[in-house]
Image (cartoon, helix red, strand yellow):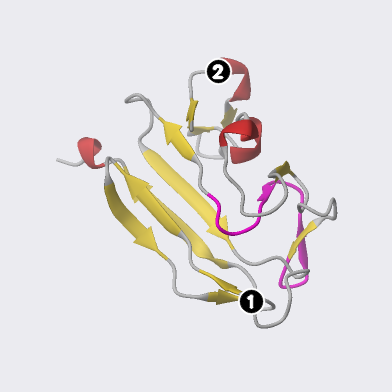
Amino acid sequence: MIAETGTEQMLETTTDNRPFIRLENFDLNHMTCGWGVPVAKKTILDKPLTIGGVIYEDGVGTHSDSEFVIELNGNGAFFESMVGLDDEAEEGGTARFTVHADGRQVERSGHAGSGMGRLGAETARNPSDET
């Protein structure tokens, strides 16, 4: 399933004036989820997104295995993400997060476990923008 970008009203701007779109602003009906359904700004159990004791107002709650494909159609220069297992995940649960761009893997986290806190922000530049 593919979500397409291009909706101008979803654009926000960073402090250094880079435009961006938050993941939860896309149509999450295009996201697969191993159990339940993906939820914007909450966990799949309708609780606040909490990683390492920090509550996040933005984001998407999902369950593994989950996949979301976003077609940038040449309109994206970078992709940033912050990932982690929510504090409500059962102890002993783990996950791995990957980011693919233009058909190749550009980021891969180690195994994240419940209670580990967030994994550092990941940035993947669109390979077609590299010189």
Residue 19, image x, y percentages: 50, 30
The residue at which mark 1 appears reads as 93
The x and y percentages for residue 78 are 38, 41
Q: Is residue 52 magenta?
A: yes
The alpha-carbon separation of the residues under discs 2 and 1 comes to 36 Å
The structure residue drawn at horizontal position 32% and vertical position 25%, both measured from the top left corner, is 74
Q: Position of residue 52 (x, y in %)?
A: 71, 73
Front residue of this view, candidates 32 and 21: 32
Label 1 environment density (alpha carbons within 10 Å; few <14, some 14–19, many ≥20): few
Residue at screen point 14% across, 40% down: 131
In front here: 43 or 10? 43
Answer left or right for 38 relative to 15: right
Which residue carries the number 2 mark? Answer: 7
Mark 2 or 1, which is nearer the eye? 1
The single residue placed furthest to the right in the displayed view is 47
Which mark sits nearer the N-terminus, 2 or 1? 2
Q: Is residue 5 left or right of residue 104?
A: right
- At 76% from the left edge and 52% from the top edge, which residue is drawn? 44
Helix, strand or loop status at disc 2:
loop
> Which quarter of the picture shows residue 26?
top right
- The reply to whether the C-beta atoms of the residues labelled 2 and 1 are less than 8 Å apart is no
Give the answer, above or below, for where 121 lies relative to 19: below
Q: Residue furthest left?
A: 131
Crowd band around label 2 with a 10 angstrom C-alpha radius: few (<14), some (14–19), many (20+): few
Task: Please tell me whether residue 64 belongs to the stretch shown in magenta.
Answer: yes
Residue pictured at 48% horizontal, 33% vertical: 1
From the top left corner, tell me how far across and down residue 9 is, in percent.
Answer: 62, 18
Q: Dot 1 lies on which element? A: loop
Q: Specify the segment rendered in magenta.
A: 51-66
Direction front: furthest residue: 35
Three-letter residue code for mark 1: Gly
Q: Which mark is residue 12?
A: none
